[in-house]
Image (cartoon, rainbow, N blue to C red):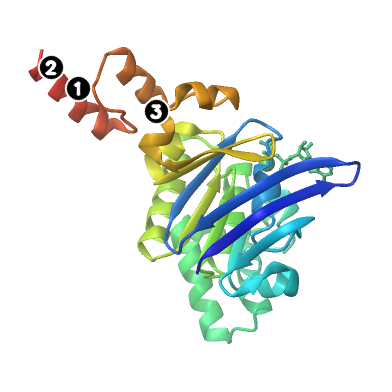
Amino acid sequence: MRIEISDLHFTYPGEINALQGIDLTIEQGEKVAIVGQNGSGKTTLVKHFNALLLPTEGIVQVGDWDTRDHSVAELASRVGYVFQNPDEQLFNSDVKSELGFGPRNLGYESTRINSLVDDAIELTGLENYRDTNPYDLSPTWRKMVALGSIIALDSPIMIFDEPTTGQDAQSVAQIARIAGELHSRGKTLITISHDIDFCAENFDRIIAMSEGKILLDGPVLEVIAQEESLATTFVDPPQLTRLGKELGLPQTVNDQDSFLDAFRQHRRHQ
Ligand SMILES: Nc1ncnc2c1ncn2[C@@H]1O[C@H](COP(=O)(O)OP(=O)(O)OP(=O)(O)O)[C@@H](O)[C@H]1O
Ligand SMILES: [Mg+2]
């Protein structure tokens, strides 16, 4: 299901022009990361994908739906959105009810709901916490519950707003694994992240935003090579990319494997 946005402007009350002319197409199955300085409009942009916000000007199309013609509840069958702060999202008294809430609301039958909940619990590793109140869990696990409740919706498009913030290395690795699994199932994954290393290692396309506009949009290796442009929105290229450049490697690298390949090649030619 394609997301197609043309000339999107959005103004918050008080004349805050958070989005100033966004043109963007995201195809089904893409793995897209959105980066950019605080306040550049990332969250405002993705909240348009599921009609949490509606354009002040311009058009947001999700598949054949113009978001202005459909409710947030209807859009939930197409776009799942994991909030930046799980506390804005979670309200059920135990994990399995939280995960079952979305599919129940979409009117799915109980056997389908149960299998979606089981699958989301397995993917997120929440097996031991089925009956636990999400508010009794650590922030790390609460984030997993927020992720799980969107996975259980089984929507073709899934948005993760800052999934790795405040997570330890093990949990970041688990989120990367979950993203990989969802991608292999054909989902469109859109993440917002300040963690450029996570984006470069796990996503195929990067969109860099600055002051309500798209500054850069392209394949990972092309975008992370644009050091000067990225700096204008306070994004540094990934650590390995910078190290590779410093060492004079001929290609831009985005993860350990590509770094080692380029490094070996470079050494052979010296
Ligand atoms: N509810 C709101 N009311 C008024 N202004 C808002 C509101 N939410 C965001 N803004 C403003 O809109 C602009 C874009 O904010 P947005 O939250 O989309 O940025 P962001 O890129 O997600 O930032 P962050 O990295 O801090 O999450 C900022 O100037 C912000 O202050
Ligand atoms: Mg944000």
User: Is 98 placed above or below 196 here?
Assistant: below
What residue lies at 75% left-to-right and 52% top-to-bottom? 88
Marks 2 and 1, how far apart in space?
A: 6 Å
User: Is 224 placed above or below 244 here?
Assistant: below
User: Is 70 placed above or below 223 here?
Assistant: below
Name the residue nearer the viewer: 27 or 153: 27
Q: Earlier in the sequence, mark 1 or mark 3?
A: 3
Disc on res. 263:
1
| Residue 49 visible in this rendered orientation of the protein | yes
Disc on res. 16:
none
Disc 3 residue type (three-letter): Ala
Q: Earlier in the sequence, mark 3 or mark 2?
A: 3
Horizontal side, residue 228 vs residue 106: left or right = left
Disc 1 residue type (three-letter): Phe
Helix, strand or loop under label 1 = helix
Residue topped by disc 3: 225
What residue lies at 42% left-to-right and 61% top-to-bottom? 29
Packing grade of label 2 (10 A; few <14, some 14-19, many >=20) is few
User: Residue lying farthest left?
Assistant: 268
Nearest to the eye among marks 1 and 3: give it: 3
Nearest to the eye among marks 3 and 2: give it: 3
Q: Where is residue 268, by image quadrant?
A: top left
Horizontal side, residue 17 vs residue 172: left or right = right
Disc 2 residue type (three-letter): Arg
Packing grade of label 3 (10 A; few <14, some 14-19, many >=20) is some
Helix, strand or loop under label 3 = loop
Residue 231 drawn at (x, y percent): 54, 22
Name the residue nearer the viewer: 90 or 251: 251
What residue lies at 74% left-to-right and 69% top-to-bottom? 68
Disc on res. 267:
2
